[in-house]
Image (cartoon, helix red, strand yellow):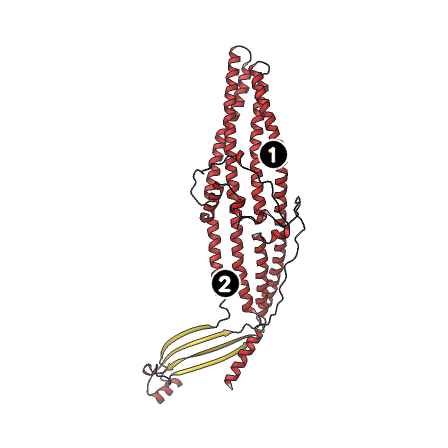
Amino acid sequence: MKRFNIITILLLALIWSGCSVSKNTALPNIAPGLFRNGSSTDSSSIGTMPLKSFITDLTVQNLIDTALVKNYDMQIALKNIDAAEVLFKQSKLGYLPELKLQVSANSSRPSDNSLNGLSLNQFTGTTHIEDYNANLGVVWEADIWGKIRNQKAGALASFLQTEEARKAVQTRLVANVAQGYYNLLMLDAQLEIAKKTLKLNDSTLRIINLQFDAGQVTSLAIQQAQAQQLVAAQLVPRLEQNVTLQENALSVLIGTLPKAINRESRLDKMNIPQDLNAGFPSSMLSRRPDIKSAELALTIANARVGVAKASLYPSLVITASGGINSFKASNWFNVPASLFGLVGAGITQPIFQRGQLKSNLALAKIDREKSVIQFRQSVLNAVGEVSDELTKVEKLKTQYSIAQKRTQTLQQASRNANLLFKSGMANYLEVITAQGNLLQSELELTTIKTEQLNAVVGLYRSLGGGWN
């Protein structure tokens, strides 16, 4: 009969384990139809391209490969995955009972004037009592209301969330390395322009000095030419400083000590991709690690609501223990005389805990509402980032075209001014003005070219590319 009662309780527990006391909140559908400034006609996107298919420069690829191995933020993200995996594996064992082995030996001597002492002396003829015990205990809580199931679901979502965090770190790292390298190429190009302009200014200054010696110009011409020369001369150490600082920053980013960065590319040889399809926002949502992380955060919040609500309901705990027990060490392992066993089951219903359980449930529901809001915000931020990068790509293309024409015009103007100056048909002010305008125009052209390259990489990252 007793065995029948225990079996009945176990069967009921298994049946009730399929019960659920909370309803999950679904993800809101808020993806817009198109990006602003986007003209996609299909769902294909550069965000789906593998990293090495999108960034084809071998130097950048090598820098990225080094960063993915040595960057400390990346290493921390991987360790977070390892920690979450340990917790997830532990949560998978939540349905199994706890098993404990206990071995104990006790000796007690009651007072001779106590009831225990008088009884002990009267019946056993001794003044102390010994107890030797070895038992194996089992404790199992039936998952009647889905508490353990929700804990397991939350642990799985947390594990997956750390993987999305790793992807987010990687996409940001890839973009930063590529953009840092492009900035380095820009500084190289600007340094080359500054040195070229400095040589041109030196040539102009020598001619003006000859004219001054011949009495054709005043000392004002020499002073203005020297001032123009010093503008280019000042740029050289400043750009050399910026090159070193950028190399140091890029070295730290890839996880190495500051050093010179080997580069074989030139900024003017870098090609800007023309076919930059962004696809639809709905397809972007499945690739962005931050959005996937926000989606998993809602899964975790749903699980915590389920756990908090299940805590309000009765819990069924079944215990069993068995082993050997003896008052004498010599009889401790005398089997079967020393064998004992105990089986029990208990149902616990919380009645009053100063409102703690209800407060936990209310807080869990508020956190779930916050997760929905944060998911909406992450989608909004993602669409905004893509729209920003699309605008940059489009407008920078127009800016570069205009700046390129301006630079070509000023290059021709500078050559003409030098020829006219040497033939006496232009004054020194026209030459200095033409050279100064050309310097600023060429520097600006390299800046816009670098912004184009960075915008393309930014668009790739914002579309969820860079982690595959």
Where's residue 297, x and y in %?
57, 58
Outermost residue on the right side: it is: 33
In front: label 1 or label 2: 1
Where's residue 63, x and y in %?
47, 43
Query: Can residue 303 be seen here?
Result: yes
Looking at the picture, does residue 314 appear above or below residue 377? below
Residue designated by label 2 = 88
Q: Nearer the viewer, residue 205 or 181?
A: 181
Residue 432 as seen in the image, left or right of residue 106: right
Q: Specify few, some or many for label 1: CA neighbours under 10 Å numbering under 14, 14-19, or 20 or more.
A: some
Name the amino acid, label 1: Tyr
Where's residue 16, x and y in %?
58, 75
Residue designated by label 1 = 400
Residue found 48% across the figure and 41% down from its top: 58
Q: Earlier in the sequence, mark 1 or mark 2?
A: 2
Name the amino acid, label 2: Phe
The image shows a total of numbered marks equal to: 2
- What's the distance in space between the residues labelled 1 and 2, CA to CA? 52 Å
Residue found 51% across the figure and 81% down from its top: 6
Outermost residue on the top side: it is: 214
Q: Specify few, some or many for label 2: CA neighbours under 10 Å numbering under 14, 14-19, or 20 or more.
A: many
Please identify the quarter of the rendering in which residue 333 is found.
bottom left
Query: Can residue 114 be seen here?
Result: no
Q: Secondary structure at mark 2?
A: helix
Please identify the quarter of the rendering in which residue 125 is found.
bottom left
Where's residue 192, x and y in %?
50, 29
Looking at the picture, does residue 229 appear above or below residue 448? above
